[in-house]
Amino acid sequence: MSARVLTAALGDYPHTASLPETPALRLERVAVKPISRAFAPMVRELRYDVSEMAIATFLMAKEADVPITLLPVVMAARFQEGALLCRADGSVRGPADLAGKRVGVRAYSQTTGMWLRGTLAAEHGVAPDAIAWTTFEDAHVPTFRDPPFCTRAAAGADMTAMLRTGELDAAIFGNDLPAGDDLRPVFPDVAAAGRAFQARHGFVPVNHLVVLKSDLARDAGLVAGLLGMFGSATTTRDALTPAIALASRWCAAQGLLARPLEAAAIWS
């Protein structure tokens, strides 16, 4: 009996470097770099059987009735504060200074931006609409439109260059931060800010999880085989509940969702 083969768009991590095969199941990895470029095709076309996906994108897709099912597999989680940078010689000395400022982000729906906006609002009194956001691309979910306090950058504009020239007062980046002594984190003590987040909420923010086409998720044996493949990256729904519940509430507060999603809808 030959193994069932599923196409999979997954990032390169230590826990995905050598995913095991079983006599019943094999993943055919599709190279997508950066992995965020797989999210829109998965949401819009169901291009892959299995895909890594940012949590904000997943929640928005679920609300839009995209037939994907969440698996309790964590691809990436991190504290977000180090991704928010400003000019070293600028007037921004801390998070509260961002009120009224111009801040760039790849997309308003970017998960790192969602976590940071939530922290800015909850802990520093800076609501999302108190900032003039500059975005550079659309959300992965095609029906979403940026809120009115966002402006789309000109085609071909570079966020890092705009920050360095002073067109932006701060910007949110992903894993790859621009190098140079001319930029610094907005949070004066990034490590302390991360510890404070974990102390308040009890978890490290989840960025990327794994989704499966919903028609495939009806096969309990297939799901069990996938969860076994991911090894230590596999966790439980209960363990993820605090992070996903807060992400859902913050997505709703920021206009990414019409309302927070209930657990039953998230895991359906």
Image: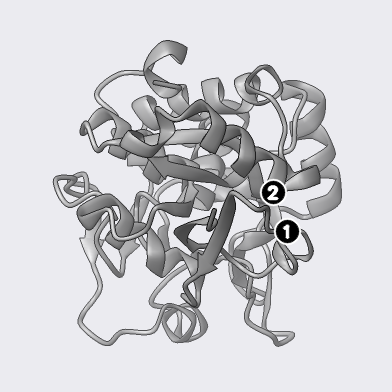
Q: Can see residue 38?
A: yes
Residue 47, quarter of the rendered image: bottom left
Which amino acid type is marked by label 2?
Met
Image position of 235 with respect to 242: above or below: below
Tell me what residue is drawn at x 31 percent, y 35 percent. Answer: 215
Q: Residues within 10 Å of mark 1 (few under 14, many from 20)?
A: some
Residue 106 appears at what percent x and percent y? 39, 65
Label disc, if present, on residue 229 of the rendered structure: 2
Which residue is at the front of the view, 38 or 225? 225
Secondary structure found at label 1:
loop
Secondary structure found at label 2:
helix
Tell me what residue is drawn at x 45 percent, y 79 percent. Answer: 166
- Left or right: residue 62 versus residue 127 is left
Tell me what residue is drawn at x 32 percent, y 39 percent. Answer: 129
Q: Report the residue marked by disc 1.
A: 20
Q: Residue furthest front?
A: 1
- Left or right: residue 220 versus residue 133 is right
Is the C-beta separation of discs 1 and 2 under 8 Å? yes
Which amino acid type is marked by label 1?
Pro
